[in-house]
Image (cartoon, helix red, strand yellow):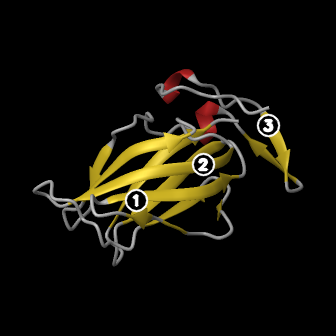
Amino acid sequence: MRFAVGIALLAGFGCTGTEELDGHTHSTDDESDCASAEDFVVGLQKSTPAGVVVTLIDATPAPPYRGVNAWTIGLTDSGAAPIPDATLTVTPWMPLHNHGLVPPDYTGTGNAAGVYIVAPFELTMPGQWEFTVDAGDGDSVKYIFCVEG
């Protein structure tokens, strides 16, 4: 059963115990898996090295959860003007387990307002995930979240 999870700080959620997936036992302990995770907050902004502002506008579910996910991401320049024609990709990666997803990259479909829909991508297990958001030409930011489920 999938649970709807409201927007919350991830610090209060527990990724505890172990889980058998793909023939391997994986730790889902907050202390080991999610120690470097950021608090998930809709509206979280980061700037790329070239000055592109990447905004996590929305996520379904929020916070990210094991299973099918979709994100809405905004791109603006440093003067807050929308960037409508970027080749935006999101690359989920689970560093503790040294794997990502298949396919590894998910392309965003953008509009004139610089808003991109990235969907669907299926997170295969709980724990800490890194999400590299590339705004084009390798100019990227990284979000690090604890995925429940």
The one nearer the camera, 59 or 90, is 59
The answer to whether mark 2 and mark 1 are in CB contact below 8 A is: no
Q: Nearer the viewer, residue 68 or 66?
A: 68
> Which residue position holds label 3?
18
> Gap between marks 1 and 3, in whole Å?
35 Å
On screen, residue 82 versus residue 98, left or right, reads left
Q: Earlier in the sequence, mark 2 or mark 1?
A: 2
Asked whether residue 94 is in view, the answer is no
Residue 69 image label: 2
Q: Closer to the observer: label 2 or label 1?
A: 1
Q: Nearer the viewer, mark 1 or mark 3?
A: 1
Out of 102 and 110, give the one closest to the viewer: 110
Q: Are marks 1 and 3 in contact (CB under 8 Å)?
A: no
Say which quadrant the C terminus sits in: top right
From the viewer's perspective, is 82 left or right of 131? left
User: Residue 117 appears at what percent x and percent y?
Assistant: 46, 57
Callout 1 secondary element: strand
Whether 37 is drawn above or below 9: the answer is below
Q: Residues within 10 Å of mark 2 (few under 14, many from 20)?
A: some
Q: Is residue 72 above or below residue 1?
A: below
Q: Amino acid at mark 2?
A: Asn
Type of amino acid under label 3:
Thr
Task: Give the residue drawn at x 27%, y 58%.
Answer: 113
- Tag of residue 133: none
Q: Position of residue 46 (x, y in %)?
A: 29, 50
- Image side of residue 139 versus residue 119, left or right: left
Q: Which residue is mark 1?
A: 116
Task: Identify the residue at horizontal 65%, vertical 70% (top origin).
Answer: 103
Query: In the image, residue 41 lies at what x, y percent?
Result: 40, 34
Q: Please tell me whether mark 3 sits on a helix, a strand or a loop.
A: strand
Q: Residue furthest bottom?
A: 137
